[in-house]
Amino acid sequence: MPATARASTIAAAFVACGLALAGCTATPPAPASTPTPTVTVSPSPTPTGPALVPDGSADDNLPLFEAVMNEVAATDARYQGRAYIDALVAAGFDKTAMEVTQDLTTVGNQADSIQFSVRWDGECLVGQVGPSIPTPTALVMDEIPGGTCLIGQTRPIDW
């Protein structure tokens, strides 16, 4: 028998033996006296999102402000200023430090954009959303002289 044919025959015999042995390997049953260990799997902690930093700067709180803004912007209430104010309050921001522009124009059409803000220690967290804004935008700006964040007429936050 040529060497290559012999090598093929030997290889085939090894494969056949391996398959035969693989089918014959069984795990023996555990003895009756061995207790079965109980494994408790705890869910791994889910990463928490940004949090309010009461003693922090406006920059420290921008991640939370932006997360809240993006969450509201992903809903059907994305062009409603009240939705942003309510969500920011729920996140821990001070409602008395907030401003928001009108949702509608003077003739009742949807405003091209709405702005909302939170005064924070001489600075302002400002968000802008609307049909004319490609993506929601949030940034930190200096407070306007007179203690406000938004220029122009804002609507009362009386709810």
Image (spheres, rainbow, N blue to C red):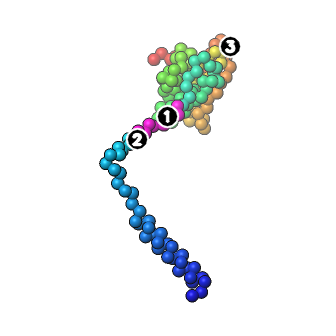
* Residue occupying the point 44% across, 37% down: 42
In terms of depth relative to the viewer, which is nearer, 100 or 94? 94
In terms of depth relative to the viewer, which is nearer, 51 or 70? 51
Which x, y percent locates residue 74? Answer: 51, 36
What residue is pinned by disc 3?
Answer: 145
Q: The residue under label 3 is which amino acid type?
A: Pro
For marks 2 and 1 on the same chain, the one whose residue lies earlier in the sequence: 2
- Camera-nearest label, 2 or 3: 2
Asked if the residue at tag 1 contacts the one at tag 2, i.e. Cβ–Cβ closer than 8 Å, the answer is no
Q: CA distance from mark 2 to mark 3?
A: 62 Å
For marks 3 and 1 on the same chain, the one whose residue lies earlier in the sequence: 1
Q: Residue furthest bottom?
A: 1
What residue is pinned by disc 2?
Answer: 39
- Quick one: label 1, few (<14), some, or many (20+) residues within 10 Å? few
* Residue occupying the point 61% across, 26% down: 62
Residues in magenta? 40-48
- Camera-nearest label, 3 or 1: 1
Which x, y percent locates residue 100? Answer: 55, 22
